[in-house]
Image (spheres, rainbow, N blue to C red):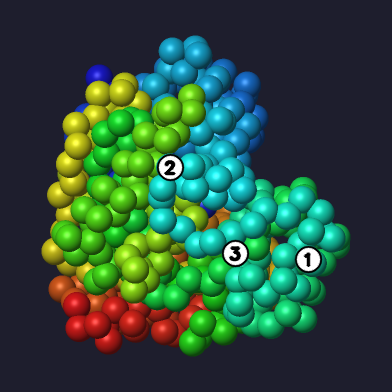
């Protein structure tokens, strides 16, 4: 029996995972490490370092955890799955070697090239001089995309509209080291044209179970203005991913990627997030993530209508049967409420009001990210603070409920986009 579940992480994605797993039949307790003020409502927060592999293994053994579900990328890149598997503990998350599919853009691009997975044309630059040469060659036209090779919390991508902007971005990434060591290598690639969507699956390395799709909003401000962020909102399902497109993504992207990973000695098991650009030539990969997305998880997981735990257990055991998780016919829209100044400098320690009112609204869920309890009050502790999710029979109704929930909440410096999900409403889905 898989009764005791550990969820690693402290964001809204992890709150959504805790919420979903706590509702699964047979689950007696969900533990959250380190968690936040919201996870404490549906799980038991455990004070531990969510990035300390040894400490997490000791926790799994001490608490007799039946299954560990890893939310963020950092513990994966530090080998948490390797450590737990070696000790005989089931875990949902790829090995350190397989997680390089996310932790190195250069590795992911090379893998796709070797195994015929459609993606943008690119070059990997290992020095500032090489980056300048690649940009000045004009080989990829404009706008051009620059990506820090390593992990940059979803912010290491710049779309430059001209040569001057591209050169400045390359200097910022590789020389100023805005993203630290993540910028030691730079991927310069063509800018794909089309609509973006997010495809989610659970895999044991050979078989795949598909979750509901989503679309997110990455820019800080309305009308896709301002800097890139970790995500300012999302909606599910994506009107762009119908049954036919889902099968194309499986056939042309997911299956050859998994086969390629296994053939190169990096069998991939866990959540797989495929960031897609749906171009005139068909779906192409923008990026892979070795985990569920954030804020997409907050709209995808409420749509799942059962079978989540059984799917995760089978993936961890290597016994997954291919399929599609049953999903609600409702639509979901999630609005991220952020601290003033995010994604750059922002203040924390602001008291959050209205949470109980918002959570009591019909068709509204509130998932916590950057929150903490202090002296009996819920306070802000990060850049992205909450995701308010609305459920409705169509996207217009879901948006209305999400924004009703957002309007009930307040904290100093709070801001959020007012156009989340509008493109789904416009698609008449």
Residue 86: image x %, image y %?
50, 14
Real-space Cα distance between discs 2 and 3?
Answer: 18 Å
Q: Quadrant of residue 229?
A: bottom right
Task: Provide the residue designation for mark 2.
Answer: 115
Element marked by disc 2: loop
Q: Which numbered disc covers residue 133?
A: 1
Q: Looking at the image, is mark 2 or mark 3 earlier in the sequence?
A: 2
Q: Which numbered disc covers residue 189?
A: 3
Assess disc 1: are there few (<14), some (14-19) or many (≥20) residues with their C-alpha within 10 Å of its C-alpha: few
Assess disc 2: are there few (<14), some (14-19) or many (≥20) residues with their C-alpha within 10 Å of its C-alpha: some
Real-space Cα distance between discs 1 and 2?
Answer: 28 Å
Assess disc 3: are there few (<14), some (14-19) or many (≥20) residues with their C-alpha within 10 Å of its C-alpha: many
Residue 91 visible, this angle? yes
Residue 222: image x %, image y %?
50, 85
Element marked by disc 1: helix
Q: Quadrant of residue 374?
A: bottom right
């Amino acid at each position: 029996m898989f009764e005791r579940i550990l969820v690693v992480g402290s964001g809204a994605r992890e709150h959504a995972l805790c919420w979903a797993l706590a509702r699964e039949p047979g689950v007696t307790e969900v533990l959250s490490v380190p968690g936040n003020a919201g996870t404490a409502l549906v799980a038991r927060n455990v004070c531990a370092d969510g990035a300390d592999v040894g400490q997490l293994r000791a926790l799994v053994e001490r608490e007799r955890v039946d299954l560990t579900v890893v939310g963020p990328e950092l513990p994966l890149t530090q080998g948490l799955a390797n450590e737990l598997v070696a000790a005989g503990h089931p875990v949902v998350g790829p090995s350190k070697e397989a997680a390089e599919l996310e932790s190195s853009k250069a590795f992911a691009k090379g893998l796709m090239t070797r195994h015929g997975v459609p993606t943008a044309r690119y070059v990997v630059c290992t020095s500032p001089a090489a980056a300048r040469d690649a940009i000045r060659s004009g080989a990829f036209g404009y706008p051009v995309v620059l990506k820090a090779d390593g992990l940059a919390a979803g912010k290491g991508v710049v779309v430059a509209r001209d040569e001057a902007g591209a050169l400045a971005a390359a200097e910022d990434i590789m020389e100023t080291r805005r993203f630290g060591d993540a910028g030691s290598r730079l991927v310069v690639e063509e800018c794909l044209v089309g609509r973006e969507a997010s495809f989610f699956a659970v895999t044991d390395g050979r078989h795949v179970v598909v979750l509901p799709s989503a679309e997110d909003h990455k820019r800080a401000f309305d009308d896709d203005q301002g800097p890139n962020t970790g995500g300012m909102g999302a909606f599910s399902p994506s009107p762009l991913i119908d049954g036919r497109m889902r099968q194309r993504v499986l056939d042309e992207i997911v299956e050859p990627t998994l086969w390629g990973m296994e053939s190169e000695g990096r069998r991939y098991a866990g959540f797989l997030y495929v960031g897609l650009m749906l171009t005139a030539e068909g779906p192409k990969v923008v990026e892979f993530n070795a985990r569920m997305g954030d804020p997409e998880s907050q709209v995808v997981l409420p749509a799942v209508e059962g079978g989540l735990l059984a799917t995760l257990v089978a993936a961890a055991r290597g016994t997954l049967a291919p399929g599609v998780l049953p999903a609600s016919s409702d639509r979901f829209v999630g609005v991220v409420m952020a601290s003033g100044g995010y994604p750059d400098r922002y203040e924390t320690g602001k008291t959050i009001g209205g949470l109980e009112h918002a959570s009591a609204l019909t068709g509204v869920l509130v998932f916590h990210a950057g929150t903490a309890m202090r002296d009996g009050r819920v306070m802000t502790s990060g850049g992205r603070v909450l995701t308010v999710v609305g459920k409705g029979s169509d996207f217009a109704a879901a948006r209305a409920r999400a924004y009703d929930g957002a309007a009930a909440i307040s904290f100093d410096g709070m801001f959020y986009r007012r156009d989340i999900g509008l493109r789904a409403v416009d698609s008449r889905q």
